[in-house]
Image: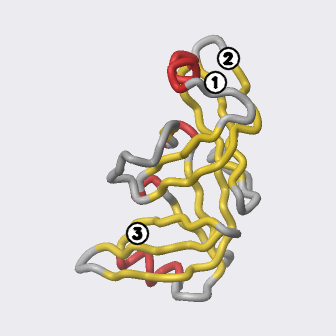
Amino acid sequence: MAISARNVFAGTVSEIREGAVNAEVVLSVGGDVIVATVTLDSLKALGLAVGVAATAFVKAPSIMLVTGDDSMQFSARNHLKGVVSEIKTGAVNSEVIIKLSGGSEVKAIVTNDAVTELGLSVGAVAGALFKAGSVILGVSA
């Protein structure tokens, strides 16, 4: 299957927290963790359970980048840290690729102004933030 999402993370479900309508699904991806929010209907339809292999998809424009110390807290459930490995600059936006310690990559589309304001360059430490509701989960049929 070909998809348009730039971020594809294959992993294993390590935890599920069910609520009245939604469930929070924790996916272990190498040394990193991705949290997704899905409906209970989707949880059942996909057969998601601890130990099940699943893939998380996140569109690059849904990724927010942060730099600096870790004194700020965010409401976004996903905060992955790594090192900028590549910046592809366009006329208005740039694609910033962050290599995570577990070996995965996160690709973000941000404005060129944001790249400058955050001081992003290859080798810089950066964080990638995205909300659990921005994560789409899939399983092999």
Q: Position of residue 118 (x, y in %)?
A: 53, 26
What amino acid is at disc 1?
Answer: Ser
Q: Which residue is mark 1?
A: 94
**Residue located 74% across and 31% down the image:** 122
* SS type, badge 1: strand
Closer to viewer: mark 3 or mark 2: 2
Check whether the beta carbons of the residues at disc 1 and disc 2 lie within 8 A of each other: yes
Distance from disc 1 to disc 3, alpha carbons, whole Å, reads 30 Å
* SS type, badge 3: strand
Instruction: Give the image quarter of residue 133.
Output: bottom left
**Residue located 67% across and 78% down the image:** 141
Task: Please report whichever mark, 3 or 2, sits nearer to the chain's N-terminal start.
Answer: 3
Check whether the beta carbons of the residues at disc 3 and disc 2 lie within 8 A of each other: no
**Residue located 65% across and 48% down the image:** 82
3 lies above or below 137: above
Q: Residues within 10 Å of mark 3 (few under 14, many from 20)?
A: some
Q: Which residue is mark 2?
A: 90
What amino acid is at disc 2?
Answer: Gly
Q: Position of residue 86 (x, y in %)?
A: 75, 33
* SS type, badge 2: loop
Q: Residues within 10 Å of mark 2 (few under 14, many from 20)?
A: few
Q: Is residue 33 left or right of residue 15?
A: right
55 lies above or below 14: above
Between 41 and 104, the residue placed more toward the observer is 104
Q: Which residue is mark 3?
A: 38
What amino acid is at disc 3?
Answer: Val
Distance from disc 1 to disc 2, alpha carbons, whole Å, reads 5 Å
